[in-house]
Image (cartoon, rainbow, N blue to C red):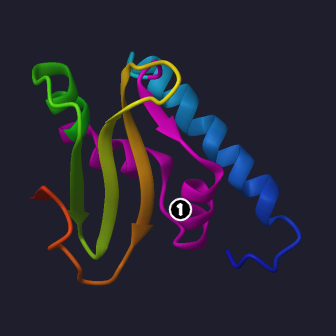
């Protein structure tokens, strides 16, 4: 779906709410942050929210098993790449996973960890 479509923002909000509900069922909604920008890119590329969670599982597992405060990740699945990081919140000072963007280009050298599914 293209951003010029009048239904684009409603689709973004729908996909974001579905993903948050999916995170709640996976017991990961307290420490995974998703932005509106992230879901705009997801809707533009027509990626299912289940596929996004599938790509985020290695980061969630590492978040639960390690104590890294700042680390960036690139998860590649088929032709889509998910950029994410583990970071410390500015106000809360708690660790969280930030899903940054989804893209197709080849630029892996700026990440600490590159995972191919």
Quarter of the figure with the N terminus = bottom right
Quarter of the figure with the C terminus = bottom left
The residue carrying mark 1 is 42
Q: Where 36 sits versus 82, above or below?
A: above
Residue extent of the magenta highlight: 29-58
**At 45% across and 61% down in the image, what residue appears?**
101
Query: Residue 77: percent from the left, percent from the top?
Result: 24, 64
Residue 54 in which image quadrant: top left
Query: Residue 58: percent from the left, percent from the top?
Result: 18, 40
Main SS of the magenta segment? helix
Whether residue 35 appears in this view of the structure is yes
Q: Nearer the viewer, residue 102 or 109?
A: 109
Q: Nearer the viewer, residue 30 or 87?
A: 87
**At 29% across and 49% down in the image, what residue appears?**
55
Q: Nearer the viewer, residue 23 or 86?
A: 86
- Describe residue 104's horizontal placement relative to residue 2 as left or right: left
Whether residue 116 appears in this view of the structure is no
Q: Is residue 59 magenta?
A: no
Q: Where 107 sits versus 72, above or below?
A: below
**At 49% across and 18% down in the image, what residue appears?**
92
């Amino acid at each position: 779906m293209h951003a010029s479509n009048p239904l684009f923002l409603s689709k973004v909000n729908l996909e974001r709410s579905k993903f948050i509900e999916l995170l709640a069922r996976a017991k990961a909604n307290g420490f995974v942050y998703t932005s509106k920008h992230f879901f705009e890119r997801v809707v533009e590329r027509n990626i299912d929210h289940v596929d996004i969670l599938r790509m985020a599982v290695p980061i969630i597992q590492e978040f639960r098993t390690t104590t890294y405060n700042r680390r960036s990740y690139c998860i590649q699945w088929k032709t889509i790449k998910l950029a994410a990081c583990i970071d410390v919140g500015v106000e809360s000072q708690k660790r969280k996973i930030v899903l940054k963007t989804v893209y197709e280009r080849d630029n892996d050298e700026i990440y600490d960890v590159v995972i191919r599914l």
